[in-house]
């Protein structure tokens, strides 16, 4: 028996009458609220209109959820269509049971945000920079959904903060092990650190042109690599690395290249006179 450990929730869903309330979904919703609140405050300081982020979220969130689910399905199709006993297409639609890929979520979410910015005539780069610290904070909150679902944990551990996993949720081959690395907690803490890094760096250098967002991506992917190394859930591997590791490497390189290429030229200030709105078209907001 460990001297201390992190318990897992006894349930992942409660019912209000006939309506199921899933904690996984509540964590995702809470994360969205945090990102919108932080992003809106930062966008207003950059000259954006109040409530703009809520309008953008009405596009970015649905796009992001679809993208996150599509990435999960594309990289793990055998979990749904791998043979007898698999849940099939109906199971693939049950997003509340878990299974969201952050890479697809960010990519499709950015597409939704871009469409919203074009629709409301807002500066997309400034929107991205305003959202930069809110995104990892949203991820930090959302990761607790994995805790409620008892999923995506790490290797067995004897550390005092080992996460207890119920027998029904243990991976094949690990049924005798009760305590595991709490990767959800590691990533949540890392994400908060990423948000603090972006805030402090942006306060010092006043990033524009999407460079604050690129810094967030760089810092997040750097941490995702070592967290992936701890996980024991099934994953496709190439040359000894999990697929998410390779994705992290590629995204890190792309974000770093963007961060460097978009830096100001010698003698040019970091923050030009960018307008939060498209001066040629004004803006149209619903709130």
Image (cartoon, rainbow, N blue to C red):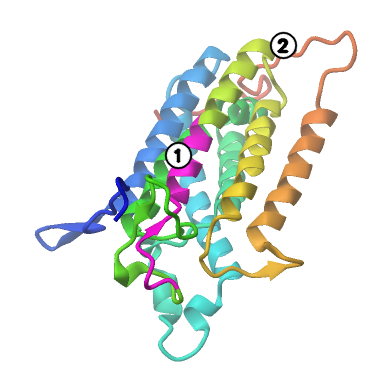
Please report the residue visible at 82 percent of the width from the left and 29 percent of the height from the top: 260
Residue at the spot of label 2: 273
Viewer-nearest residue: 82 or 155:
155
Please, is residue 263 above or below residue 182 in the view?
Answer: above
Q: Magenta stretch?
A: 174-192
- Residue 187 among magenta residues: yes
Please report the residue visible at 57 percent of the width from the left and 49 percent of the height from the top: 227
Please, is residue 282 above or below residue 99 in the view?
Answer: above
Please report the residue visible at 70 percent of the width from the left and 16 percent of the height from the top: 274
- Residue 21 among magenta residues: no
Please report the residue visible at 46 percent of the width from the left and 40 percent of the height from the top: 188
Q: Give the spatial CA distance, label 1 vs label 2.
A: 33 Å
Mark 2 residue crowding within 10 angstroms, few (<14) / some (14–19) / many (20+): few
Please, is residue 141 above or below residue 248 in the view?
Answer: above
Mark 1 residue element:
helix
Residue at the spot of label 1: 140
Work out whether residue 227 can be spotted: yes
Mark 2 residue element:
loop
Image-quadrant location for residue 272? top right
């Amino acid at each position: 028996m460990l001297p201390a450990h992190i318990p897992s929730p006894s349930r992942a869903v409660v019912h209000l009458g006939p309506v199921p309330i899933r904690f996984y979904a509540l964590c995702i919703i809470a994360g969205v609220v945090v990102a919108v609140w932080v992003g809106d405050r930062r966008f207003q300081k950059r000259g954006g209109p109040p409530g703009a982020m809520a309008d953008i979220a009405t596009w970015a969130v649905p796009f992001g959820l679809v993208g996150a689910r599509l990435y999960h399905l594309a990289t793990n199709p055998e979990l749904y269509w791998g043979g007898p006993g698999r849940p099939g297409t109906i199971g693939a639609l049950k997003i509340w049971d878990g299974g969201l890929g952050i890479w697809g979520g960010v990519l499709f979410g950015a597409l939704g945000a871009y469409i919203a910015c074009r629709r409301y005539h807002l500066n997309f780069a400034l929107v991205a920079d305003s959202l930069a610290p809110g995104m990892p904070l949203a991820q930090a909150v959302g990761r607790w959904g994995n805790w409620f679902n008892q999923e995506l944990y790490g290797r067995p551990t004897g550390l005092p903060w080992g996460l207890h996993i119920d027998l029904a949720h243990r991976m094949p081959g690990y049924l005798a092990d009760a305590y595991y690395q709490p990767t959800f907690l590691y990533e949540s803490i890392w994400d908060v650190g990423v948000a603090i890094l972006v805030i402090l760096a942006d306060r010092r250098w006043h990033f524009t042109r999407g460079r604050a967002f690129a810094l967030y991506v760089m810092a997040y992917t750097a941490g995702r690599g070592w967290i992936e190394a701890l996980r024991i859930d099934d994953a496709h591997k190439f040359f000894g690395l999990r697929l998410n590791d390779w994705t992290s490497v590629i995204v890190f390189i792309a974000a770093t290249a963007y961060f460097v290429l978009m830096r100001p030229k010698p003698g040019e200030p970091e923050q030009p006179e960018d307008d939060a709105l498209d001066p040629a078209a004004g803006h149209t907001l619903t709130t």
